[in-house]
């Protein structure tokens, strides 16, 4: 059975340049990743933004799949096939070298996810309307509307948007 090639040539070229370095610094990214990564895994922002949106989404999908692996989730068949085929295309890419986390990295990952959640809660706490659009592959787009003209006395208190949209859950990393 032939493996389909999920990554476009621009993504393959980009990821091929990102070889694993054991001394790479760990980073936290609020948007778009909401988690940790290492500096040898992500292209420079200027290079990332030169890629087509579809190519950027392919890269973000790889990070989303790896987060699922870190969270101990079973991958869907589609995600597993995408991950495996991408790994076949660029096996030396740094993102494929950190499939399991040390205890310290697990802690950093949990803290980063919680920090990102807190940042979004703060950002949208007073929004009158928040819209999430699923772009697929674990990527979401969001927009918020704030009614700056409303009279605070007339505003009816409501549950924050994130509690209306997402059930509060914390997953442990196994």
Image (cartoon, rainbow, N blue to C red):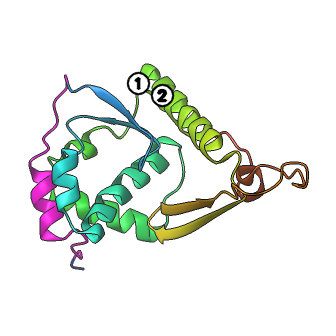
Q: Position of residue 88 (x, y in %)?
A: 19, 60
Q: Identify which residue is drawn at 40% across, 48% down.
A: 66
Q: Decide if residue 32 is on the left or right side of residue 48.
A: right
Vertical placement of residue 129 versus 17, above or below? below
Between 150 and 45, the residue placed more toward the observer is 150
Q: Mark 1 points at which residue?
A: 102
Residue 172, visible in the rendered structure:
no
Q: Position of residue 67 (x, y in %)?
A: 45, 46
Q: Identify which residue is drawn at 21% across, 42% down.
A: 94
Between 145 and 107, the residue placed more toward the observer is 145
The label number, if any, that marks residue 106 in the structure image: 2
Q: Identify which residue is drawn at 53% across, 55% down.
A: 74
What residue span does the magenta drawing correspond to?
Answer: 3-23
Image quarter hosting the N terminus: bottom left
Between 148 and 129, the residue placed more toward the observer is 148
The secondary structure type at the circle numbered 2 is: helix
Q: Does the magenta stretch include residue 15?
A: yes
The secondary structure type at the circle numbered 1 is: loop
Vertical placement of residue 172 versus 48, above or below? above
Asked whether disc 2 touches disc 1, contact meaning CB atoms under 8 Å apart, the reply is yes
């Amino acid at each position: 059975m032939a493996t389909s090639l999920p990554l476009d040539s621009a993504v393959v070229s980009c990821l091929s340049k990102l070889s694993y370095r054991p001394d790479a610094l760990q980073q936290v990214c609020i948007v778009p990743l909401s988690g940790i990564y290492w500096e040898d895994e992500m292209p420079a922002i200027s290079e990332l933004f030169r890629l087509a949106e579809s190519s950027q989404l392919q890269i973000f999908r790889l990070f989303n799949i790896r987060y699922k692996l870190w969270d101990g989730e079973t991958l869907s068949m589609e995600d597993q096939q995408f991950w495996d085929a991408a790994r076949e295309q660029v096996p030396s890419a740094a993102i494929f070298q950190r499939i399991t986390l040390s205890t310290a990295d697990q802690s950093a990952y949990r803290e980063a996810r919680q920090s990102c959640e807190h940042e979004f809660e703060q950002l949208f706490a007073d929004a009158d309307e928040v819209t999430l659009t699923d772009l697929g592959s674990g990527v979401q787009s969001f927009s918020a509307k704030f009614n700056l003209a409303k009279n605070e006395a007339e505003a009816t208190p409501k549950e924050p948007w994130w509690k209306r949209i997402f059930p509060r859950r914390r997953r442990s990393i196994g």
